Amino acid sequence: MMILVVDNDKTIRLSLKLILERNGYMVALAEDPKAAIAVVKSQPEVELVLMDMNYTNSTTGDEGLTLLKQVKVFRPQLPVILMTAWGSIDLAVQGMRAGAFDFITKPWDNGVLLERIETAIKVNAESITHCPLPSPPEGGSPFERRASRNVRPPLGEDGREPPGLVSFCPPSLRSMPPSPASPLPMPPSSSPARAAPARNLLPKPFTARAAVPRDPS
């Protein structure tokens, strides 16, 4: 299982690499958005991205939001965890709306970080389990064809998906809950019962009549 770490600070990249490798993850490193996109496009085995939000002197987080949107173009279902030392509620909300799975501020707690990573990978795997298999596109780039083939790879002998493959399941393709069963059809020989006509329960209008004098005889 591979995680891509994107940060312009070499110390942070190496620190995260050491932590992740000690916990059984393979790690790919990128120092800027251009290198990150190259890894995302060329290495479909990447299953999660840890991404810094600032790569120059700016502290607005706009660079990270732009990179996040670019990653989602190529890998819509790839979970991304944003990291920044200039965190704010507004920036976290923007990141979530752009498709980030989580938001962590620096300096981070190793235990919390590893827990968030495990949760992101687990939730993403569960959502892919209910994804239908689309037909591979006839045209398109080699990356698109490879991504389509990797949606639901054949199961191995142990009933699990082989490692090293990345599923690609847009939200629109996720399976929906089954619809309620439709009523049983009526037998051909029987006809549906006719509804009884509605009864008029309103009182009848009263019509006044002139009094008729009695015959005295």
Image: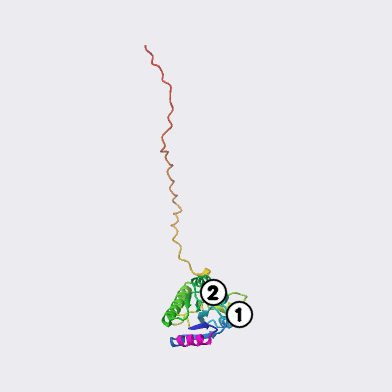
Amino acid type of the residue that numbered disc 1 sits on in the rendered structure: Pro
**x, y percentage for residue 64?**
55, 77
Q: Which residues are magenta?
A: 9-19
Quadrant that contains the C terminus: top left
Disc 1: CA contacts within 10 A as few (<14), some (14-19) or many (>=20): few
What secondary structure predominates along the stretch shown in magenta?
Answer: helix
| Colour setup of the view | rainbow
**x, y percentage for residue 9?**
53, 85
Q: Nearer the viewer, mark 2 or mark 1?
A: 2
Q: Which mark is residue 76?
A: 2
> 209 or 48: which is nearer to us?
48
Relative placement, left or right, of 134 versus 177 is right
> 30 or 201: which is nearer to us?
30
Residue 137 drawn in magenta? no
Q: Which mark is residue 142?
A: 1
Q: Residue furthest left?
A: 217
Residue plotted at (46% across, 78% down): 121
Q: Secondary structure at mark 1?
A: helix
Q: How many marks?
A: 2
Relative placement, left or right, of 62 versus 160 is right
Q: Secondary structure at mark 2?
A: loop
Amino acid type of the residue that numbered disc 2 sits on in the rendered structure: Pro
Would you place residue 3 above or below residue 204 in this image? Answer: below
**x, y percentage for residue 51?**
52, 79
Residue plotted at (59% across, 77% down): 144
The first of marks 2 and 1 along the sequence is 2
**x, y percentage for residue 27?**
50, 86
Q: Are marks 2 and 1 in contact (CB under 8 Å)?
A: no
Would you place residue 201 above or below residue 68 in this image? Answer: above
Disc 2: CA contacts within 10 A as few (<14), some (14-19) or many (>=20): some
> 68 or 198: which is nearer to us?
68
